[in-house]
Amino acid sequence: MVSQEQRRRQLAREKFLRQQQRRAAARRRARVRNSVIASVLGVVVIGSLALYTTGVLNNGDDDKANASAEVTPSASATSKAPDPCDKPAPGSVKKLSWKKEPEMTIDTSADYTLKLATTCGEIDVALKAKAAPHTVNSFDFLAGQGYFDHTKCHRLTTSGIYVLQCGDPTGTGTGGPGYTIPDENLKDSSLKGNVYPAGTVAMANTGQKDSGGSQFFLVYQDSPLPPSYTPFGTVSEAGMKVLKKIADAGENTGAGDGAPNATVVIDKATVVKS
C-alpha cells in the first residue's frame, strides 16, 4: 500500500515533469518563431564580413533582431494567385561589386527621390538624405551604376509583418554590393512603439551592427519590428497602391513568407535630385 508521503512525492515528481515538458515546448516554439522572423529581413553579406547563414539569412544569435515581430503561419491556400504584373523589360542583371563604400557625393540639404520602375507599376520613394546620408548616398551610387536594374524583389511577407524585400541582384537573399554601410536614423520619429509604419522603406541587414548592403524592404502595412533597420525613405501614395496590388497577389508558400506570386522586377531604378 502506498503511503501518504510516497503519494505526495509521486505527485510532486509528476508536477515537475509536466512543468519541464511545458517549458521545453515553449522553447521549441520560440526557436521556430525566431528563426522565421530572423529570415524575413536578414541578408548575407559577402565581402568584408563573414558569411552569415541566415535563411535570407540570419545566424540566429542576435536576439535583438528577432524580437518583437511574431510571424504566425497564414491559413491561406497555397494555390498561386493570378500575376497582376507585366513582363520584365529586356535586359539582364549586371554583376557588380565594390570593395568599399562610395565616397559621399550627395547634398544632404537637397531633396532626393528614388524612382523604381517595376513590372507592377512605378514606386516613388522620398529619401531622407539628411537623416540617413550614407544610405541615400549608396543608393544614389548604385542606381547610377545600374545595379538594381532587372533585379527581382525576392520576398513578400503577409503575416505578422508586412513587407516586400528587394535589392538583391541574385534574387536569393544572399547578394550585396561587396561593401556595407552604417546603421542610421534608428531613432526616427516615425518609429513609435517598435512599429515600422506603412510606407516606410528601410534597410535589411544580417542582424549585426552596420551590416546593411543593397537589400531593402518596403512596408505596405504597419509592422512590429525592433528599431534595428535603417529607415531611409517614404513611399508615395501612388506607390502604396502598387505595393497593395503586389501584396494582394500573395506569396508562393501560403505560410506568410515567400517569393511574391506577382512577378516583381525592377526594370529601372533612378535617384533624382530636386
Image (cartoon, rainbow, N blue to C red):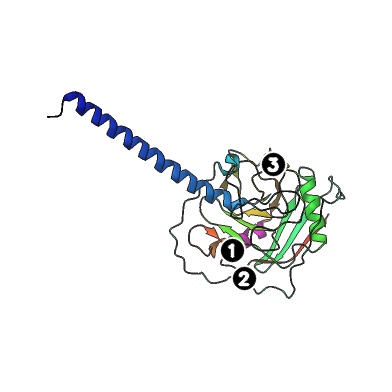
Residue 236 lies left or right of residue 155; in this view the side is right
Q: Residues within 10 Å of mark 1 (few under 14, many from 20)?
A: many
The residue wearing badge 1 is 246
Q: Quadrant of the C terminus?
A: bottom right
The residue wearing badge 2 is 85
The residue wearing badge 3 is 209
At 57% from the left and 63% from the top, the residue drawn is: 259
Residue 103 lies, in percent from the top left, at: 87, 49
The amino acid type of the residue labelled 1 equals Ile
- Evaluate if marks 1 and 3 touch, with contact meaning CB atoms under 8 Å apart: no
> Secondary structure beneath disc 3?
loop
Which contiguous range is marked in magenta?
Answer: 237-244
Instruction: Check if residue 241 falls in the magenta segment.
Output: yes
> Secondary structure beneath disc 2?
loop
Disc with the residue nearer the chain's start (1 vs 3):
3
Residue 165 lies, in percent from the top left, at: 63, 57
Q: Residues within 10 Å of mark 2 (few under 14, many from 20)?
A: some
Is 191 above or below relative to 43? above
Residue 129 visible to the viewer: no
